[in-house]
Image: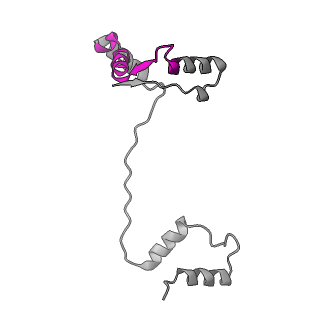
Amino acid sequence: MTDEIKPDATQATTQDAQLTAESMTEGKEKMPSVDIDADYAAAQQFSVSDIDHTPEGAEAADKATAHQFATTTPSETKSETPSTGDPSDYMAMAKDVGAPNDAVGNVDDDLMKKALEKGQPDK
């Protein structure tokens, strides 16, 4: 896939770029072209070196990416919660993890009434 670059002299940031763009559009200079597929293939050649295909390269890669600090292995913990079906158990659990009952902000009865009215479907 070869793409042709079409310079626009009005978008040039310097006078040299503007003059170059004008001469390209007038045909005085050759338009540059970009072959994306060829550039991609060339980049693939540089992505892996020859030493990476050898055992020494694999060892060097492992050494380079190894942890530098000691890490611990996580241990599995099990916790069982008995299913009692008692709603008060759930209320106590919600209080343990929930926010305090202190109201935050300016919420009063009138505001709550308005919110409830707005939440009702139109009849």
Report the quarter where the N terminus lies: top left
Question: For the stretch drawn in magenta, what is the main secondary structure?
Answer: helix
Determine the residue positioned at 28% across, 12% down: 54
Residue 39 in which image quadrant: top left
For residue 11, side relative to residue 5 (left or right): right
Between residue 94 and residue 54, name the one nearer to us: 54
Determine the residue positioned at 48% across, 26% down: 6
Q: Residue furthest front?
A: 26
**Picture coordinates of residue 111, whole percent (x, y):** 66, 80
Determine the residue positioned at 37% across, 77% down: 85
Between residue 66 and residue 122, name the one nearer to us: 122
For residue 37, side relative to residue 25 (left or right): left
Residue 9 in which image quadrant: top right
Determine the residue positioned at 41% across, 21% down: 34
Between residue 118 and residue 10, name the one nearer to us: 10
Tell whether position 39 is magenta: yes
**Picture coordinates of residue 55, whole percent (x, y):** 29, 13
Tell whether position 85 is magenta: no
**Picture coordinates of residue 38, whole percent (x, y):** 34, 18
Residue 21 in which image quadrant: top right
**Picture coordinates of residue 95, whole percent (x, y):** 54, 70
Range of residues picked out in magenta: 24-53
